[in-house]
Amino acid sequence: MTDTTEGSAQETFISHLVELRDRLLRAIIAVVVVMLALFPWAKDIYAILAKPLLAVLPAGASMIATDVTGTFLVPLKVTAMAAFVIALPYVLWQAWAFVAPGLYQHEKRLALPVIVSSVIFFLIGMSFAYFFVFPVAFGFFAGYAPDGVQMMTDIDKYLSFVLTMFIAFGLTFEMPVVVIVLVRLRIVTIEKLRAARSYVIVGAFVIGAIFTPPDVISQLMLAIPLWLLFELGLVLARFVGAGPTRAEADA
């Protein structure tokens, strides 16, 4: 009886691994297909990404490539990033199809809105960085260039800076989702979160100082939204409320 049970558990585990492999392959194939479709416009996609910096460079200045392969690899990386964003709904659908059978009904009702809202808030955070933070930050740096020094940024370093900012602001805008999930899963109560408001505000400004350029405006443009999004999460969590306990879900 024990051997039969162990064999059944092993078969189930292997079947889960096979399903996980298949869904990962589907997600990767989707990203690769989109990237190949976008590849002819790789230079244009990078030009869009570089537009906030190019707009503030002095007349006659341009970006440079210090690596021989940079002119090819950097636009390719940007195209891959754009392809992942475009294929993200399908990738998330594969992830959802894998984990959904193992969830309780109330967890399914929470998981799908959390996934969708997480993607939306992350994209909003990236858009906020691109349209509002980049022009301010790059304008600040271009305006403080010493006499006789021409601002010419390497395209690979620019990509690294942009990705860091996208991730920082994307994660920052996930704050309402994090607060709602914590309250819904009964990990923490709204009252405790309110009591920790002062620590959240201090932490927001510390995060702003770490992940943004050294100008005060950029730091405020990360810290203040992080604080306000925390307050938004508290408001939304009141409407969502706490979820059932594990015993209630089993019942």
Image (cartoon, grey):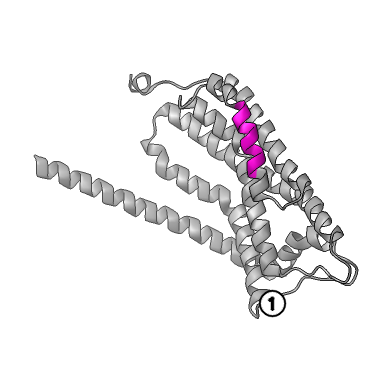
Residue 2 sits in quarter: top left
In the image, 98: left or right of 157? left
Residue 233 sits in quarter: top right
Residue shown at 78%/53% (left/top)?
137
- Could you tell me which secondary element the residue under label 1 belongs to? loop
Seen from the viewer's position, the closer of residues 212 and 19 is: 212
Of helix, strand and loop, which mostly describes the magenta segment? helix
Q: Position of residue 63 (x, y in %)?
A: 77, 70
Seen from the viewer's position, the closer of residues 22 and 190 is: 190
Q: How many numbered callouts? A: 1
Q: In which quarter of the image is the C terminus?
A: top left
Residue 120 sits in quarter: top right
Mark 1 nearby-residue class (10 Å; few <14, some 14–19, many ≥20):
few
Q: In the displayed structure, would residue 214 be above or below residue 80?
A: above
Q: Residue furthest bottom?
A: 68
In the image, 47: left or right of 161? right
Asked if the stretch drawn in magenta spans residue 46, the answer is: no
Q: Position of residue 45 (x, y in %)?
A: 72, 63
Q: Position of residue 114 (x, y in %)?
A: 54, 35
Q: What residue type is labelled 1?
A: Thr
Query: From this viewpoint, is residue 123 visible?
Result: no
Residue matched to label 1? 66
Asked if the stretch drawn in magenta spans residue 205, the answer is: yes
Q: Residue furthest right?
A: 59
In the image, 159: left or right of 103? right
Residue shown at 71%/53% (left/top)?
213
Query: From this viewpoint, is residue 24 visible?
Result: yes
Residue shown at 49%/21% (left/top)?
242
Span highlighted in magenta in the image: 197-207
Q: Quadrant of the N terminus?
A: top left
Q: Position of residue 126 (x, y in %)?
A: 68, 48
